[in-house]
Image (cartoon, rainbow, N blue to C red):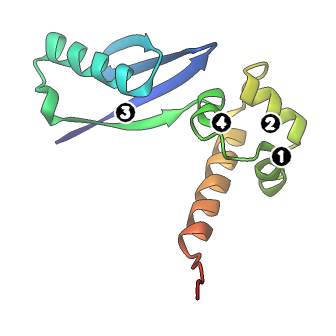
Amino acid sequence: MEKILLIIEKSGNELFGRVNYEDNLLIDSARTLSSLERKFKKLLHEFHDVERKQISFEHSYDITALFDKFGYLNITSIAKKAEINPALLRQYASGVKHPSPKQAKKLEDTIHQIGKELSDVAVYSE
């Protein structure tokens, strides 16, 4: 199975994606992530003769798409944990501003740290 990087951005109600495969930049859009993946599998098959069943995607989200996809993430709490101004992170999430690579990495590291913390949680019941 071939794992291909799919970069996902959001604008309005539409998801925009791009894949760079063998120096060929493919771009498409869809309303849902599953539709976007189907379109890219079709494009990769048509342009590069890659079997659709042999493709899986690694997702990389822009900040707007990230907070849309994972709506349960609290922007203010994550901003504080990442030591980023919450108002600035809300601007990133709404697409008004865009984070620098350093800020994006800081957010990614914070979200990964939260995931690790949550994976260690045990819920007690009687």
Residue type, numbered disc 4: Phe
Q: Which of marks 2 and 1 is nearer the N terminus?
A: 1
The mark lying in front, picked from 1 and 3, is 1
Residue 109 picture location, percent across and down: 63, 54
Question: What residue is shown with label 2?
Answer: 89
Q: Which of marks 2 and 4 is nearer the N terminus?
A: 4
Q: Is mark 4 on a helix, strand or loop?
A: helix
Disc 4 + disc 3, Cβ < 8 Å: no
- Contact between marks 2 and 4 (CB within 8 A): the answer is no
Residue 17, given in percent of the width and then of the height, sits at 44, 19
Q: For the residue labelled by badge 1, is the local secondary structure a helix, a strand or a loop?
A: helix
For disc 1, the marked residue is: 76
Q: Of the residues tagged 2 and 3, which is closer to the observer? A: 2
Q: Do the residues labelled 2 and 1 touch (CB within 8 Å)?
A: yes
Spatial CA distance of label 4 from label 1 is 12 Å
Amino acid found under the numbered disc labelled 2: Leu
Q: How far apart are marks 2 and 4 (CA)?
A: 10 Å
Q: Which residue is drawn at 89% across and 42% down?
A: 85
Query: Given the image, on which type of amino acid does mark 1 rest?
Result: Thr
Which of disc 3 and disc 1 is earlier in sequence? 3
Please report the residue visible at 75 percent of the width from the left and 24 percent of the height from the top: 94
User: Based on the displayed image, in which of its 4 quarters is residue 68 positioned?
Assistant: top right
Residue receiving disc 4: 67
Helix or strand or loop: what does disc 2 sit on?
Answer: helix
